[in-house]
Amino acid sequence: MAPIVHDHRALKAWGLKNTKQRKAILNILVQSDDPLTADEIYIRLKAENTEVSLSTVYRALELLCAHSVLQSVTLSGDNRMAYVLEEKEHHHYIVCSRCKRILPISHCPLQAFEKALAKETGFVLQGHRLDLYGLCPECQRKQSEDADAAAAALPKNG
Ligand SMILES: [Zn+2]
Ligand SMILES: [Zn+2]
């Protein structure tokens, strides 16, 4: 269940104009367990006949991130972002750089570091980003199959 703070009432509480599009975008993200890219959100909006342009989706996503309603995850390789509701409990993500699969990491390794850094610098820390990249087990397997196939295709020169 998505926390109530993320529904359209929350948008009003934060002083955001509660447009139909923003509400529709939030609904899509509430229903999704995985972070979605702007394109994926746009396709889903179209599928449910929401009148919206891709640039409106981008603008809304940017705004919702700026207000900490959403959290963005950078997908490696193509500089795309995926978006997910900012949970009360903060998450990091590991992204497969081949298939773009995204897994949440429930543990935040930076909390102790933040405390120490705040003490050291006098900053009041408001947040941080940490996305990790790698190859998921399935892609590791596919990659070694590809390598085997490539090796098999090489001409055998004695
Ligand atoms: Zn993968
Ligand atoms: Zn963290």
Image: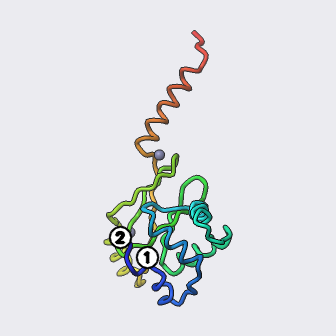
Q: In the rendered image, which quarter contains the N terminus?
A: bottom left
CB-based contact (under 8 Å), mark 1 and mark 2: no
Label 2 beta carbon within 8 A of ligand 2 = no
Q: Residue 24's spot in the image, x, y percent?
A: 54, 73
Q: In the rendered image, which quarter contains the C terminus?
A: top right
Q: Residue at x 67, y 67 (%)?
A: 54
> In which of the image's four quarters is ligand 2 placed?
bottom left
Q: Residue 29's spot in the image, x, y percent?
A: 48, 68
Q: Residues within 10 Å of mark 1 (few under 14, many from 20)?
A: few
Q: The disc labelled 1 sits on which kind of residue?
A: Gly
Q: The disc labelled 2 sits on which kind of residue?
A: Met
Q: Residue at x 57, y 60 (%)?
A: 40
Which residue is tagged 1?
Answer: 127
Which residue is tagged 2?
Answer: 1
Kindly indicate the quadrant of the structure image that contains residue 20: bottom right
Distance CA(mark 1)–CA(mark 2): 24 Å
Of 45 and 117, nearer the camera is: 45
92, above or below 136, in the image? below
Please tell me whether mark 1 sits on a helix, a strand or a loop. Answer: loop
Q: Residue at x 54, y 72 (%)?
A: 25
On the picture, is 26 further left or further right than 20? left
How many numbered discs? 2
Q: Earlier in the sequence, mark 1 or mark 2?
A: 2
